[in-house]
Amino acid sequence: MIAVLKQGATKQQIDNLCTWFKGQGLDVHISEGKFYTVLGLIGDTSKIDVDMLEDLDIIESVKRISDPFKSSNRKFHPEDSVISIGDLEIGGGNFQMIAGPCSVESPEQILEVAERVKASGASILRGGAFKPRTSPYDFQGLKADGIELLLEAKKRTGMPIITEIMNANHIPLFENVDIIQVGARNMQNFELLKELGKLDKPVLLKRGLANTLKELLMSAEYIMAGGNEKVILCERGIRTFETYTRNTLDLSAVPMLRELTHLPIVVDPSHATGMARLVKPMAMAAAAAGADGLMIEVHNDPSKALCDGPQSLTPEQFDDVAKRVRKILEVIKE
């Protein structure tokens, strides 16, 4: 249920109303916009008398929400959420390019890639330290050593870093990581999501290979219900009957999520297509569709990459993609 307050409602009136709601066993999420304040009521609202609420002087309207996701629902929070990552912001018209190798392989590799993608306009460095692989015999990442190399690249370039977490027991290792990524395979690892909900740190949540948008938002809800509202959604392709691409990039998810939620939306064309040559057109299309950012894999020598070489761009290719995306962004802002 949401209650839209009238303009001019005083802080004392709002506090008194919130106290009453909490006395009814409800949690209250307050969203203050330019013109209205919206109270999102979470819990069993079946006993709340809508007519009684609408008779109150400070309430403009009351609506019941049937969607199971509440905190991430745009109806609870009409304006776009803007999430701060150091000096950067993402969401609400702030577009960020996330780039770097699929996996951190060596000091030389991550430092070279970091410097090259930053020079091309990337603002956040990605790199896998813990790597979920389909085969147990494939490279699993450098783990804690990989995080240390990312932190060194951050120190050298000033770029915030993002890397994927596999296990809640690893959270202490991520203390200095700027954004924690939850991969597609862990989207419904609810115990991990609950632990991430206790942190005061941005979490990028990737859509699962065969999950609906509602399921993605319900996973975001797990994090937000724990108190961490710094969630960024990521569309990275879903598994369909098509075999020519690694996955099928669902670009319709961007405008659809824009209607459903206030959370920032990032698109990963690298994992979605699995082919370096398809990254540029899909990145441009994602920007045109209204994404708040892109996540692109870049390797200084893709042919020798230990993970996902075929979908990784060279620094030169990324530079071209970044220039094209900026042109798209200029057009859609007009």
Image (cartoon, rainbow, N blue to C red):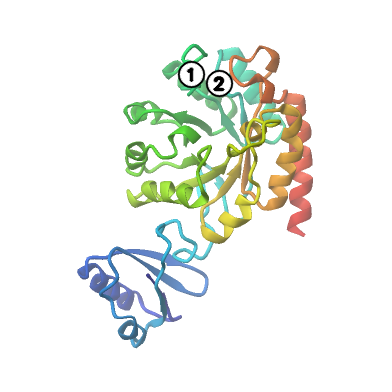
Reading the chain from its start, which is encountered first: label 2 or label 1?
A: 2
Expressed as whole percent of the image width and height from the top left, the position of residue 120 reads: 72, 32
**Residue 96, above or below 116:** below
The one of 233 and 59 positioned closer to us in this rendering: 233
Instruction: Determine contact: label 2, label 1, CB under 8 Å.
Output: yes
Query: Compared to 94, does 61 lie above or below?
Result: below
Q: Which mark is residue 146?
A: 1
Q: Count neighbours of disc 1 (C-alpha within 10 A) and say few if under 14, some if 14 to 19, many if 20 or more.
A: many
- Which dot marks residue 110? none
Against 9, residue 74 (above or below) is above
Q: What's the residue at 68%, 18% (across, down)?
A: 300
- Identified by mark 1, the residue type is Gly
> In terms of image quadrants, where is residue 14?
bottom left
Q: Is residue 292 left or right of residue 21?
A: right
User: Taking 160 as reference, is 213 above or below it?
Assistant: below
x 64%, y 39%: residue: 248
Q: Say the numbered circle drawn on residue 103.
A: 2
Q: Residues within 10 Å of mark 2 (few under 14, many from 20)?
A: many
With 306 as the anchor, is 277 left or right in this view? right
Q: Position of residue 221 (x, y in %)?
A: 40, 51
Q: What is the quadrant of the C terminus in the image?
A: bottom right
Q: Closer to the observer: label 2 or label 1? A: 2
Specify the quadrant that holds the N terminus.
bottom left
* Amino acid type indicated by mark 2: Ser
